[in-house]
Amino acid sequence: MFIDTGKLTIQPIHTTWLPKNISAAMLRLDTIHPVIQGNKWFKLKENIAAMQAAGQTLLLTFGGPYSNHIAATAAACQALDIRSIGVIRGEAPNEWSNTLIQAKAAGMQLEFVSRRTYREKENIDWAAQFPGAYIVPEGGNNALGVKGSEDILLHSDSTAFTHILAAVGTGTTLAGLVNAAQANQCVWGYSALKGSEGMEQAVAAYIHNHETPWKIWHDVSEGYGKTSQALFDQMNDFYWQTGIPTDIVYTGKLLLAWQRQLAAGVFPGGSNILVVHTGGLQGNLSLPPNVLDF
Ligand SMILES: *Cc1c(COP(=O)(O)O)cnc(C)c1O
């Protein structure tokens, strides 16, 4: 198997800014594969299984030019010898992102569409244009994506943690974590988007464990993909203190928000916090060199 869940470990976190009466660890989903890493594999695996069970051999999905989901899907389909099509938001750029270059090199057929068409993608019959295609929504956001995400906590014992934290894009991963968590654990999501208030309803539709409390923090990101020096400083500091690299879109912002919450006393003494590293490291390649120390 090209995914190494043996590398999926819980790493204790010791930093200067972690209060003495709080303990924390990181669930390393970023280590399972260089590209098919983090939550993306978990969201894909049940979709790929369903596609194969249906005898389909072409997978079509969607994403922006820096999408971790596009990168992971292209690499997973290459490894499994599945034909893949990526419908990419926006006209083909003059200069391709590393994500697009790698996806194409992995054999993914890229179909660039206007932003307007992309917004309408849910109303378009893609299987008519690409016969036989199995459609995976943007970000792997469907019931099978949630089902796969329920396995994230399966590979290690996380029952002793009081809080489980994860970055949120569509909330698919969060829903899976909630479904798999214990009733006495809190699952908190940190939205990487701006103006994502109200997404709870869509996430709740995927949650069948009604005992575990959960919530999404929204005032975390200056905007999807927007970066700042404070973000880079925090990511570099975390790397030097723990050896763990994070990404600029999701996990770095989660860290920044978490550190602010710790300083503000949001977590009661005695909390034992598991931070899920959802991967996404390929996205850092869009930065100029030397911004990050890793
Ligand atoms: C895609 C992604 C997320 C968001 O996952 P959702 O299931 O869409 O909420 C979080 N972290 C990283 C690193 C990602 O690539």
Image: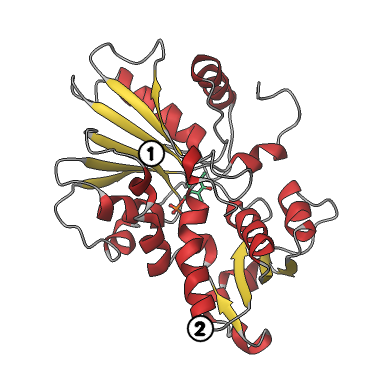
Residue at image x 57%, y 36%? 247
Residue at image x 38%, y 49%? 152
- Image position of 162 with respect to 139: above or below: above
Expressed as whole percent of the image width and height from the top left, the position of residue 187 reads 27, 43
Ligand 1 within 8 angstroms of badge 1 C-beta? no
Of 256 and 8, the residue lying toward us: 8
Expressed as whole percent of the image width and height from the top left, the position of residue 50 reads 47, 75
Q: Is residue 171 visible?
A: no
Residue at image x 26%, y 55%? 179
Q: Is residue 279 visible?
A: yes
Expressed as whole percent of the image width and height from the top left, the position of residue 154 reads 34, 48
Q: Quadrant of residue 219?
A: top left
Q: Is residue 188 left or right of residue 223?
A: left
Distance between mark 2 and mark 1 Cα atoms: 42 Å
Using a 10 Å C-alpha cutoff, classify the residue at mark 1 as few (fewer than 14 neighbours), some (14 to 19) or many (20 or more).
some
Expressed as whole percent of the image width and height from the top left, the position of residue 142 reads 42, 68
Residue type marked 1: Asp
Disc number placed over residue 130 in the picture, else none: none
Disc number placed over residue 54 in the picture, else none: 2
Give SS at disc 2. loop
Select label 2 or label 1 by which is in front. 2
The image quadrant where one finds the N terminus is bottom right
Q: Is residue 135 left or right of residue 109?
A: left
Residue type marked 2: Ala
Residue at image x 33%, y 33%? 274
Give SS at disc 1. loop
Name the residue tied to disc 1: 219
